[in-house]
Image (cartoon, grey):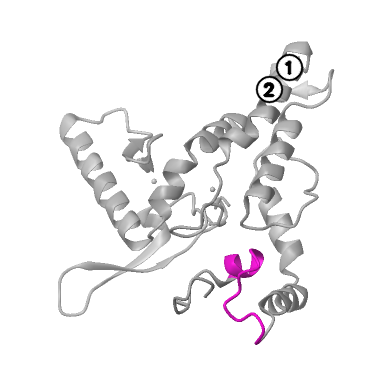
Amino acid sequence: MSDGKPYDGKNILQLALDGKSPFAGAWDVELLIREIEEQLNTKDFAREYLLERLFKAMPPSLSMPVAPTRDFWTHALEAKIEATIGEEGEMIGWESDNERVGPIALAAQQSLLQAIPCLLPVDDGTGGSLYRLVIEHGDFGIHNTTISIRAGSSEPLFTSLFNWETAMSVGPVDLVVDEDGGPSVTRLPEETTQVNLETYTGWANHRIQTLYHETPGYEAAVRAGKDFRKLWFTLRD
């Protein structure tokens, strides 16, 4: 590596995209990536799949290749804002609202577009890419899993996760994170008691601690992206 340290085998795609391939001069990682994309048609798949998961309103197309970079997500957020708040006189919101874009909405659109650079932090490369694309299942409940018992113990073991049609490319209760990346719960049943709430909170704490432990860098990405997430889901809802 350029810093004199041995390559640890991680983040080869990001290193290649940044022009810092540990194999420079030996073999061309970027050429390999392009060949894989061409043979598997991954660029078209990624672009079409991501568009389907942007929620309505969504742009008709994306003019940049899908990539785990700040530039791509800047473009994706710009496209999302412009699709949600269109030209003057176009429909805005749900069809049943019967609302049209006017001067106030247009001014809001321009303000949001100007705010994008402030919402997307610069990725310093520590702990993995902030802009790595991940797929969220969207309906992670016991009804969408198969479970066995771990050999030699009575502990349950999840052996598969299926039914991905509601998956997104950022349960009876949802175990989520709050604005600062801490554990939280949402969609609580109406009959939730204090004991239930303490149980759900315990689940949320266990989930987030395990997630942050098993995926180094995820916590930093969640915290850094809180303003982006707030705007993204506001545009969706």
Segment colored magenta? 13-26
- The residue under the point 48% across, 60% down is 128
Q: Which residue is mark 1?
A: 107
- The residue under the point 68% across, 50% down is 72
Q: Secondary structure at mark 1?
A: helix
Asked whether 37 or 122 is in front, the reply is: 122
Residue 6 rendering spot, x and y as whole percentages: 45, 79
Q: Is residue 213 left or right of residue 89?
A: left
Residue 176 rendering spot, x and y as whole percentages: 38, 42
| Predominant secondary structure, magenta span | loop
Asked whether 100 or 68 is in front, the reply is: 68
Which image quadrant: the C terminus? top right
- Tell me if residue 223 comes above or below residue 99 in the rendering: below
Q: Quadrant of residue 79?
A: top right
Q: Within 10 angstroms of label 1, few (less than 14), some, or many (20 or more) residues?
A: few
Q: Which residue is mark 2?
A: 111
Q: Is residue 172 visible?
A: no
Q: Is residue 89 magenta?
A: no
Q: Is residue 225 left or right of residue 80?
A: left
Q: Are marks 2 and 1 in contact (CB under 8 Å)?
A: yes
Extreme-bottom residue of the structure: 26
* Dot 2 amino acid type: Ser
